[in-house]
Image: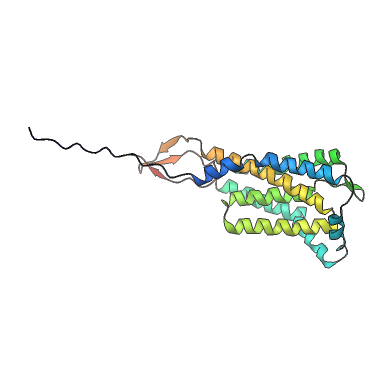
Amino acid sequence: MPKTKRAKAKRPKRPAPDVFREWYRLVRGWPLVLVAAMLVLGLSVGRYSTPLDEWFRRFQDTPMEVLVLYTNWLLLAHVLAVAILVALFRRQWRLARLLVIAPLVGWVLVQVLKHLFERQVVNYLAYPSGHLTAAVIIWGMVVILADFQAWAVFIALTFSYLGMTGQAIANHYFTDTVGGVLLGTAIVWVCARSIRLDRCQPRELSVSHEGLALPHDSDAGSSPALRTVR
């Protein structure tokens, strides 16, 4: 009988590594690290200024005070309102909810922490800075909304840094602004994690008349891609 050649079994291809997932595993604990750093900094500086704080305060009553406008509440409110409208227009429901909730959570935490540390500048509680906490949260959520594009990251870093400098000169100690940045970054990190986990969830599909499967909603964040049904 003629020998039949056995077909070689093809080895299944190893799936490409998910770079984001590997990176996420390394940094998923960072919100706790950031909050811990904020608490340690607040306990370290106490209720009084440091030499670094005083160096920034030397620029009071100079044109550099105008940098405080980068953390103006009116500016931040407009940026937040536009971001919410964009998220709603894109039907990114979870992101829209987080855009509303995250600044509120930040405000509540700032009020609690200010009464905990009782650090004062003139006659008001200062640590951590509520202006910087809000600015970092809002600009960080804009970065998430823009899917971490370079232009959004650049704008967020620039506005946050300039606002940080302005607040350190005009209204706060510099270390107050550092505490606000740490707290705001931790909250944004948690929001980014929530968006990432939601993207990993399976979605119920509906078939259109053209034979394409469409997700029922795009709650995960980015615009859903069309996938053909075999």
Could you say where residue 56 lies in the image, as x and y percent from the top left?
84, 59
The residue located at (46%, 34%) in the rendering is 204
Q: Nearer the viewer, residue 183 or 108?
A: 183
The residue located at (51%, 35%) in the rendering is 201
Farthest-out residue, bottom = 63
In this rendering, the count of numbered labels is 0
Q: Nearer the viewer, residue 154 or 77?
A: 154
- Residue 89 in sight from this viewpoint: yes
Farthest-out residue, left = 1
Farthest-out residue, top = 1
Could you say where residue 117 lies in the image, as x and y percent from the top left?
85, 41
Q: Is residue 61 above or below residue 12?
A: below
Task: Please state, as top left, top right, bottom left or bottom right, where the C terminus lies in the image.
Answer: top left
> Could you tell whether 11 is left or right of 88 in the image?
left
The residue located at (88%, 64%) in the rendering is 61
- Residue 91 in sight from this viewpoint: no
Q: Is residue 69 above or below residue 211?
A: below
> Could you tell whether 1 is left or right of 110 in the image?
left
Task: Please state, as top left, top right, bottom left or bottom right, where the N terminus lies in the image.
Answer: top left
> Could you tell whether 13 is left or right of 220 in the image?
left
Farthest-out residue, right = 123
Could you say where residue 144 lies in the image, as x and y percent from the top left?
60, 49
The residue located at (71%, 55%) in the rendering is 160
Name the colour scheme.
rainbow
Could you say where residue 139 lies in the image, as x and y percent from the top left?
67, 52
> Could you tell whether 5 is left or right of 86 in the image?
left
